[in-house]
Image: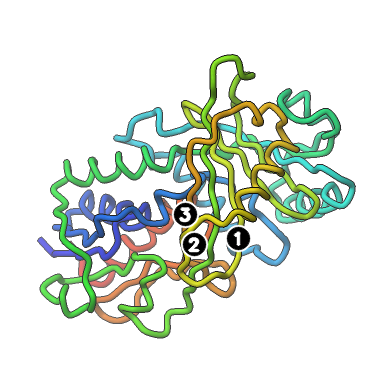
Amino acid sequence: MPTLAVVGGGVIGLSVARRAALDGWRVRVHRADVPGASWVAGGMLAPHSEGWPGEERLLRIGLASLQMWHDDFLDGLPPEVVTARESVVVAVDRADAADLATTSEWLAAQGHPVTVTRAARDVEPLLAQGIRHGFVAETELAVDNRALVTALAARCQDLGVSWAPPVRTLDEARDADAVVIANGIDAPTLWPGLPIRPVKGEVLRLRWRRGCLPLPQRVIRARVHGRQVYLVPREDGVVVGATQYEHGRDTAPAVAGVRELLDDACEVVPALGEYELAECAAGLRPMTPDNVPLVGRLDERTLVAAGHGRSGFLLAPWTAATIAAELEVGVGV
């Protein structure tokens, strides 16, 4: 039985490990005790909502991966990890509406149209009174990021995957037949030259309180005076995100970022002002220059699965399948 070392215990590393274990590999995951970027995420599976002209390749990959989520990626995982089964994308002002029109026209030109609406509150009654323009992406999903990571780790353990501390160099994993670098922003420390950089983003968790209006049942994404905000349902509230800016490896939530998210979220859904502010956090997205992740072979025994940016959860199934195909060609089982 061939052996595989996966460096990284987030959604990408665990998805790769699970698939490899199912394919007959003896897998070891090197992971840190401290939660990483996967713990601070919205968990949206949203290739249509995230799409933008110029990112055609990312759209194609995202749509293929979303189909894998629908097909079988959730097999063996608790059904409650899925928290929403539709997205509505809305605009606050005329300029925002023009941006949405650009996106929806581009999606249609790519052969992946969305349902355009001028009565967004008929779709999602919690929206603010003045919000009318938007589109609906019926096949998009959202997952509870923390529940999913926990469930993937449990499934890996059931399949015989073992755990080990992080490695500082690839030599520390030289006993494995193959190694997958899946440790996000730290990937360049193991393979210098990988074009991955950290991009900071604040995320808030708002908890529903007795007397508040009910939770939204779908993901709400909005353009608010040129900024983007998303609201993702959870069992007990809503995740609000996410700012995006270059700030090195700083993971302290900034007042300006938190204030911006709260202002934008409440402008889109005023009822959120009555929720409890349960958590403020910041994560570091592993970004590449073109926003397309680095997934493939680096040399005879080393592969990379990193640089997923804002699409880590969406692209987990596609990444696991791509790495599995490379492993089958490279070593075989």
The percent coordinates of residue 264 (x first, y second) are 71, 44
Q: Amino acid at mark 2?
A: Arg
Q: Residue at position x 17%, y 45% from top?
A: 157
Q: Nearer the viewer, residue 266 or 183?
A: 266
Q: CA distance from mark 1 to mark 3?
A: 19 Å
Specify which label sits upstream in the sequence, 2 or 1.
Answer: 1
Label 2's element? strand
Q: Which residue is mark 1?
A: 244
CA neighbours of label 3 inside 10 A, class few (<14), some (14 to 19), many (20+): many
Label 3's element? loop
Asked if marks 3 and 2 touch (Cβ < 8 Å), the reply is no
Which mark is nearer the camera, 3 or 2? 2
Image quadrant where residue 219 sits: top right
Specify which label sits upstream in the sequence, 1 or 3.
Answer: 1
Work out which residue is located at the far bottom of the displayed protein and give it.
193
- Return the mark for residue 315: 3
Work out which residue is located at the far right of the displayed protein and give it.
94
Q: CA distance from mark 3 to mark 2?
A: 14 Å
Q: Amino acid at mark 3?
A: Leu
Q: Which residue is mark 2?
A: 285
